[in-house]
Image (tube, rainbow, N blue to C red):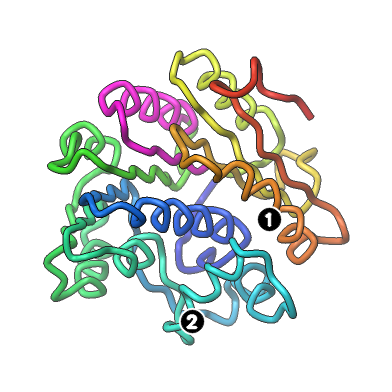
Amino acid sequence: MNYRHGFHAGNVADVLKHGVLLAILDYLARKPGAVTVLDSHAGAGLYDRAADGEWPAGIGRLESAAALPPLAARLVAAVAPYPDSYPGSPILARDCLRPQDRLIACERDPGVASRLRRALAGDRRAAVHCRDGWGGLKALLPPATPRCLVLIDPPYETADDFTRLATGLVQAGQRLSTAILAGWYPVKGRAAADGLAAALYRSGLARVLRVELLVEPADDPRRLAGSGLILVRPPFGLAAALAADLPAIVDTLGRRGTGGARVDWLSGETAAPSEE
């Protein structure tokens, strides 16, 4: 899968990923203790809404909707200050930071890392590391603060990214006993996504939630049907909120009247992952 951030920015996958990211950051902000956000594959931060991009089918549809559930409304409000651009995860996270919080962003491409530094320029709470995100998970964790959110969002340009995501989540989960972890993945057919869920189910980690938003049936491995998140130690109440909001988002974003949402526990709340 060749992932082009600029082309895909604001698409249906970003709706899920960034909506959940904001929900977690809002939860963490309820308590005064400092929070560190580590974004392992950060990208450039801001992307022009190009005419040939995928944002009209994602954030564009939400912005045009007459009524939205809370998760979608929060995302629309967060991107409103950027009418000509779409903000990626490091910018959305930066906008949620309080004075005591910190953002660590990893981006291995020097040119892209320079763009991200410019987007975050002047904010001493944010640090950009031009390095591979997988290595950053080992070198930059644990952070200085006990409260932490780790977002792992690889580009899936190599065949082993699903395996590396499973390994990264398990290793980070074992090293960080209280951190919230979020790992994003595309859904093209069921094999790779279900294999990832099975690996996390067998991992021994407590409280692992799977969340998926599909805009069409996941029966063709050549087509991107949607995306998912593996959440380790998600905020209490988030699963119920997602289960309530995602069906309405599917109604807005679904293609040809198809699609679906899934919110199920791989560990901690149920005995085993559900199957489609």
Height in image: 65 above or below 220?
below
Q: CA distance from mark 1 to mark 2?
A: 20 Å
Height in image: 115 above or below 127?
below
User: Residue lying farthest bottom?
Assistant: 83
Q: Is residue 47 magenta?
A: no
Amino acid at the residue labelled 1: Asp
Count residues near mark 1 (Cα–Cα under 10 Å), then give few for <14, some for 14-19, many for 20+.
some
Instruction: Name the residue at 23% across, 49% down.
Output: 36
Residue 112 position within the rendered picture, expressed as x and y whole percent measured from the top left? 28, 63
Tag count: 2
* Label 1 vs 2, first from the N-terminus: 2
Query: Which residue is the site of mark 2?
Result: 80
Amino acid at the residue labelled 2: Ala
Element on which disc 2 rests: loop
Toward the viewer: 56 or 275?
Answer: 275
Q: Which residues are magenta?
A: 160-184
Toward the viewer: 171 or 107?
Answer: 171
Residue 245, numbered label: 1
Q: Nearer the viewer, mark 1 or mark 2?
A: 1
Height in image: 254 above or below 276?
below
Circles 1 and 2 in contact, beta carbons < 8 Å: no
Q: Is residue 148 visible?
A: yes
Locate residue 82 relative to residue 17 in the image: left or right: left
**Location of residue 169 (image quadrant):** top left
Residue 269 position within the rendered picture, expressed as x and y whole percent measured from the top left? 60, 24
Toward the viewer: 265 or 256?
Answer: 265
